[in-house]
């Protein structure tokens, strides 16, 4: 048994500590207490945890770049000015915001292409 003290509330930590543990949790306030192999009894240790958050930029749909993407995957029947894509007798319209209007199954296929295009940006 080790006698550690919480750096936040000062409460003693009396639980068992494995020789492999580097941190324990205060049973009273929930703060993290750092454990060192050469820990001296009664010495107060403080650990500050910093959480970083990564913010991704919002991706915007660009119909002209989408036309280039379609051309790259072999779809040559898309007109970025009107937004109309034809395959055989099927036709759908892609709006400037990336919405697809039309009938299945072409609508689903174009929506998947838009998802792939946006994930590669």
Image (cartoon, grey):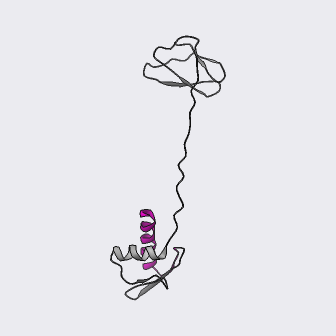
Q: Position of residue 49 (x, y in %)?
A: 56, 33
Q: 116 above or below 47?
A: below
Q: Is residue 111 magenta?
A: yes
Q: Residue at x 36, y 77 (%)?
A: 71
Q: Residue furthest left?
A: 74
Q: Position of residue 47 (x, y in %)?
A: 56, 27
Q: 80 above or below 39?
A: below
Q: Is residue 16 magenta?
A: no
Quadrant of the rendering where the C terminus is positioned:
bottom left
Q: Position of residue 62 (x, y in %)?
A: 49, 72
Q: Position of residue 25 (x, y in %)?
A: 56, 26
Q: Residue furthest right?
A: 9
Toward which corner of the image does residue 58 lie, by quadrant?
bottom right
- The front one of 69 and 89 is 69
Question: What span is in magenta?
Answer: 98-121
Q: Residue furthest top?
A: 41
Q: How many marks?
A: 0
Q: Residue at x 47, y 14 (%)?
A: 38
Q: Residue at x 56, y 36 (%)?
A: 50
Query: Magenta stretch mostly in which secondary structure?
Result: helix
């Amino acid at each position: 048994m080790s006698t550690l003290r919480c750096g936040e509330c000062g409460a003693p930590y009396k639980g068992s500590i494995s020789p492999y543990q580097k941190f324990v949790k205060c049973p009273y306030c929930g703060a993290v207490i750092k454990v060192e192999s050469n820990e001296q009894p009664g010495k107060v240790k403080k650990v500050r945890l910093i959480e970083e958050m990564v913010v991704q930029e919002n991706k915007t749909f660009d119909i002209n770049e989408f036309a280039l993407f379609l051309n790259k995957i072999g779809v040559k029947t898309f007109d970025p000015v009107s937004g109309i894509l034809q395959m055989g007798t099927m036709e759908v319209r892609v709006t400037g915001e990336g919405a697809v209007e039309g009938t299945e199954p072409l609508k689903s296929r174009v929506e998947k292409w838009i998802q792939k295009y946006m994930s590669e940006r």
